[in-house]
Amino acid sequence: MSAINYTEKIPNNVNLAEDRTLQRALEQWQPNFIGWWDDVGPEGSSNFDVYLRTAVSVDPQGWAHFDYVKMRDYRWGIFLNPADANRAVHFGDQKGEKVWQDVPGEHRANLRRIIVTQGDTEPASVEQQRHLGLTAPSMYDLRNLFQINVEEGRHLWAMVYLLHKHFGRDGREEAEALLERRSGDENNPRILGAFNEKTPDWLAFFMFTYFTDRDGKFQLAALSESSFDPLARTTKFMLTEEAHHMFVGESGVSRVIARTCQVMNELKTDDVEKVRAAGAIDFPTIQRYLNFHYSVTIDLFGADQSSNAATFYSSGLKGRFEEGKRNDDHVLKGQTYAVLEVHDGQLVEKQAPMLNALNEVLRDDFIRDSQAGVGRWNRVIEKAGLPHRLSVPHKAFHRNIGALAGIKLSPEGKLVSEADWQAQQHAWLPTSEDRAFVASLMGRVVEPGKFAGWIAPPAMGINKQPLDFQYVRFN
Ligand SMILES: [Fe+2]
Ligand SMILES: [Fe+2]
């Protein structure tokens, strides 16, 4: 039941051949998707054969099949985790009822909005990353970038399938619009802020895949609890792919740090200019990149108090992270949760109704998860015998959404005046000079087994291949 049929034009495990109308609709969308990929997918890559992982079934063993593929011929398709016939709604007002195989009329608008918002992030990140291949620090890294890009493309397919199958004509229109918006476009931007930022260099890319793909993990995990069963099953499968994206981010930053430590130890210095002159990225710059990506990513969770969040939960559309592992009533009426606000010039906690604070609950889960990796980065520095430590900034630092939007705060959490902010933000967020320095390091290194001087090699290759394996054939 979980085998994927590759003889079909659109590989799938949803019996697409039995639904002619849907199949025709998706076959019409497909050339537009390929057009989008050719237009704004990885630049100059159309001839490359890339050593990619492709799902051949949704079993744990079946989604890790490796072979050389041209990216535009990647097996884009529709893969849902197997259904559980006994699955019941397990949170919200309809707890205990059977899950829905189709969209209930009263939830149609909200579900469409949730699916479109998730779907929009997938092509956006491909657009943001499209030039990075030109400055890859190694062939290994180039292949990882491309793996992420094709999987984000497939994630778009996952959401478009739901739109076509369950939302009729407006679903088809939304599916077209997903190919028309462009990251950073003034007139027709992507829906969410972080997905309109540039990803101009590989340090930004690693920070993005560590933090922003992790936002993806938490959003997908919350949607995988949904009472709308096809959404739950498709996001469950997407999560298996997301894990690799976060690995690329965590190990990428870790390797940058390892190289910096090595240079600092060789030169016996922590002088920023000397570290830079030796071609490594200094810790203050890494910290400022971290501050930027962390703060724009936690904005993605939305306003700290939101009536939409309450509606999505109570009506069973979107659960909490690991809803099933929590020991409460899964209805949450009358419960409260701490949110932050500024009161009399002080940052204070106040209790808000839990249902309205569910964005904040998910944000706090994300914060705990992302701090763990920063701790692992610090152990690399510690092992190198250096005293420096990285940290995530205060939750209210550099925020643009919710009650904390626009508040001027140091990364340590101290409220500062507008004048202080202006005077110090160059120490807290990447400056144009930082970005120019990092950009100056970005040269193309693609000889098998060679790595750019600002990053250490990884511990091991992909799929147990050696580091000097030919991960990409340029033809
Ligand atoms: Fe994705
Ligand atoms: Fe991702």
Image (spheres, grey):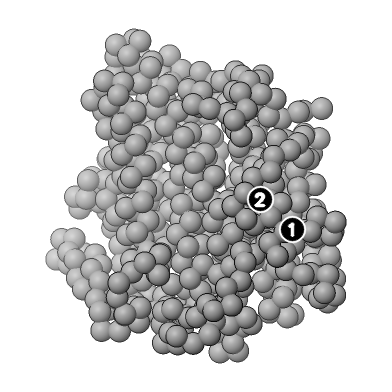
Q: Is residue 429 visible?
A: no
> 371 or 232, which lies in front?
232
Rendered view: 320 above or below 129: below
User: Which quarter shows the C terminus?
Assistant: top right
How far apart, in angstroms, are the residues tagged by discs 1 and 2?
A: 9 Å
Picture quadrant of residue 469? top right
Helix, strand or loop at label 2? It is loop
- Which residue corresponds to the image point at 57% horizontal and 63% vertical from the top-left? 235
In this rendering, position of residue 473 left or right of residue 436:
right
Q: Quadrant of residue 301?
A: bottom left
Q: Which quarter of the figure has residue 345? A: bottom left
* Disc 1 target residue: 4
Mark seen at residue 254? none
Q: In the structure shown, which secondary structural element does the residue marked by tag 1 occupy?
A: loop
Q: Which mark is residue 62?
A: 2
Is ligand 1 within 8 Å of the beta carbon of the residue shown at mark 2?
no
Residue type highlighted by circle 2: Gly
